[in-house]
Image (cartoon, grey):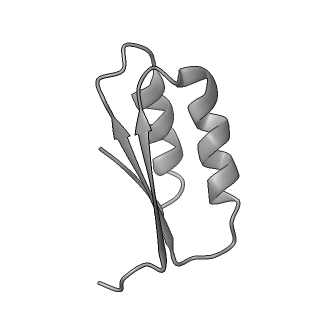
Amino acid sequence: MQQKELSIIIPVYNAEKYIGRCLQSILKCPEPEIEVVVVDDGSKDASLSVCKEIAAKDSRLNVF
């Protein structure tokens, strides 16, 4: 596995209103050598679902 040049780690807790826009903004970066790691801390809203939906479309995003 090739090491990425840049890793962005985003902790998420009840950020349903904002996380989609945040991730889309980061993933607009044309650089293929980035990875975005989202760590959901037991959100009570749909934050995790939003993150997983976006991750299904972009392999640079990993959701935990």
* Horizontal arrangement in the rendering, residue 33 relative to residue 49 (left or right): right
Provide residue 23's location: percent of width, then percent of height. Answer: 59, 46
Q: Is residue 44 above or below residue 26?
A: above
Q: Quadrant location of residue 32?
A: bottom right
* Horizontal arrangement in the rendering, residue 41 relative to residue 23 (left or right): left
Q: Is residue 26 above or below residue 18?
A: below
- Specify the farthest residue to the top: 44
Identify the residue shown where x is 47% and y is 38%: 51
* Horizontal arrangement in the rendering, residue 49 relative to residue 33 (left or right): left
Provide residue 47's location: percent of width, then percent of height. Answer: 46, 26
Q: Is residue 12 above or below residue 2?
A: above
Identify the residue shown where x is 69% and y is 50%: 25
Q: Is residue 46 above or below residue 5?
A: above
- Specify the farthest residue to the bottom: 2
User: Quadrant of the image for the N terminus?
Assistant: bottom left
| Depth check, front residue: 10 or 29 | 10
Provide residue 48's location: percent of width, then percent of height. Answer: 40, 30
Identify the residue shown where x is 47% and y is 49%: 55
Provide residue 40's location: percent of width, then percent of height. Answer: 34, 34
User: Quadrant of the image for the C terminus?
Assistant: top left
Count of marks placed on residues: 0
